[in-house]
Amino acid sequence: MSALARSAALKLDWANVASSLGLKGTTVASLQAFRKRNEDARRKVVEFQAQPSTVDFAYYRSVLKNTAIVDEIEAAFKTFKPVTYDVSEQIKAIEAFEVKALENAKATEVKVEAELADLIKTLDNIESARPFEDLTVPEVIAAKPELETKVKEMVTKGRWDVPGYSEKFGGLAVM
């Protein structure tokens, strides 16, 4: 981790991240779990850095009878070089994913705002509408012109019953 990234990680105000970004629910829980893992990893790094990193091979030669093993381990220890990995490809992939995620989030925000505006308009329309009982037949036909043709078709075919009416409101016949 670079010094700049380490400095940024130390200065991060975890308490304000969730509130400033407006995060809720599982996102906040995931963020808190990440914070805990971050703090645990940082604590272990500090703990390991405090431990001595030198090996006293002379002590092991004096304690062990087989000093050839100690010589072999010391030679392997001195020639050991940690493997370095080039993580630039992974970082590029993560940055590309982040850019794509931000684009998707912005597109979703636009869609949600448009849908919200439409829902607000619909709600205003519902609230300002007259009660069903006050509507007249010409107003209903003006709102749904296909009803007039449907009713004319039913009358010409001799169907006077509206499908489902009897089941919902009951019949007029008294028995």
Image (tube, grey):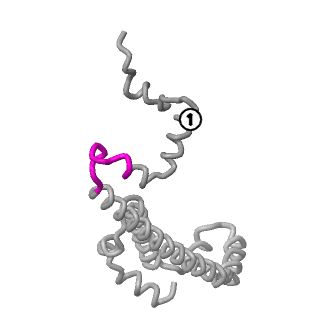
Residue drawn at x 48%, y 78% as measured from the top left: 52
Q: Nearer the viewer, residue 70 or 40?
A: 40
Q: Quadrant of residue 122?
A: bottom left
Type of residue at label 1? Thr
For disc 1, the marked residue is: 156
Residue 136 lies in magenta, yes or no? yes
Kindly tell me whether residue 56 is visible in this rendering: no
Q: Is residue 158 above or below residue 135?
A: above
Residue 172 x, y percent position in the rendering? 37, 20
- Per the rendered image, the range of residues in magenta is 129-139
Residue 131 lies in magenta, yes or no? yes
Residue drawn at x 58%, y 68% as measured from the top left: 63
Residue drawn at x 38%, y 50% as measured from the top left: 138
Q: Nearer the viewer, residue 4 or 72?
A: 4
Quadrant where the C terminus is found in the figure: top left
Residue 121 x, y percent position in the rendering? 35, 64
Furthest residue toward front: 156
At numbered mark 1, what does the secondary structure look like: helix, strand or loop?
helix
Q: Quadrant of residue 174?
A: top left
Say few, some or many: other residues with alpha carbon within 10 Å of mark 1 (under 14 / 14 to 19 / 20 or more): few
Residue drawn at x 41%, y 59% as measured from the top left: 26
Kindly tell me whether residue 30 is visible in this rendering: yes
